[in-house]
Amino acid sequence: PYTIAKMDMVRNLTVKDGEACYISIADMAVYDATGAAANANKTDIVYLYRSIPDFSFNHALVSPAADPQYLPGVTLPNGVSNSTMMLKVFNLQDYNLAQLQYGIYIDDLDFQQIDLSDAPNYAINLKAEAGAWVQTADKKYKAYIFINSVNKSQKSAVISIKRYEL
């Protein structure tokens, strides 16, 4: 006998600064401002790209409730205010999400054991093949968001998500 994983997965979602930049863990979807306003209670993360002189911000995943310094130039849609906890990580290329040669697999036990209670509500300076552990404000989900690729000139990225319902 063995336990069947209960996590969900979605791959290759495109996020773009100022456009399709609102991420919902509950829906495992990316919204524009109109979609985020219509799903405000499910909007957990804002993707943005900023090139700030003398500061390594670049590609970022930021909670809507984060300090405004982590959301420069962002006007949130009405009602979008969740405080999502995040822990930035490097070198965790889950095979299912990365689709690379690595043999690392994130499974249910990883979601059960990761403690995000003291994590910040932002992850800045993300790069391709980096990621972030996430816990939604309502504590209903934990997720791992993997950055498949980034495009500085387009201010965009491709992400993949594994989600675990608590």
Image (tube, helix red, strand yellow):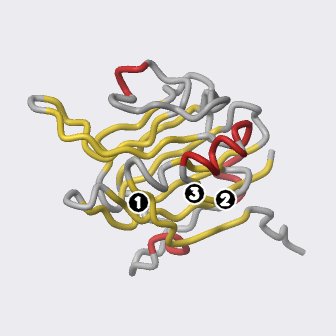
- The tag on residue 30 is 3
Res. 124 image quadrant? top left
Q: Which residue is mark 2?
A: 28
Assess disc 3: are there few (<14), some (14-19) or many (≥20) residues with their C-alpha within 10 Å of its C-alpha. Answer: many
**Residue 26 appears left or right of 156:** right
Vertical arrangement, residue 45 with respect to residue 24, above or below: above
Which quadrant of the figure contains the C terminus?
Answer: top right
Q: Which numbered disc, 1 or 3, marks the residue closer to the eye? A: 3
At label 1, which amino acid type do we have? Ile
Q: Earlier in the sequence, mark 2 or mark 1?
A: 2
The CA distance from mark 2 to mark 1 is 15 Å
Residue positioned 47% across, 59% down in the render? 146
In the rendered image, which residue does mark 1 sit on?
147
Give coordinates of residue 54: x percent, y percent: 9, 29
Structural distance between the alpha carbons of marks 1 and 3: 14 Å
Q: Position of residue 77 (x, y in %)?
A: 57, 35
Report how many numbered discs are placed on residues in the image: 3
Residue 65, position as x, y percentages in the image: 55, 24
On the picture, is 155 further left or further right than 153? right
> Are the residues tagged 1 and 3 within 8 Å (C-beta)?
no
Q: Is residue 107 above or below residue 81?
A: below
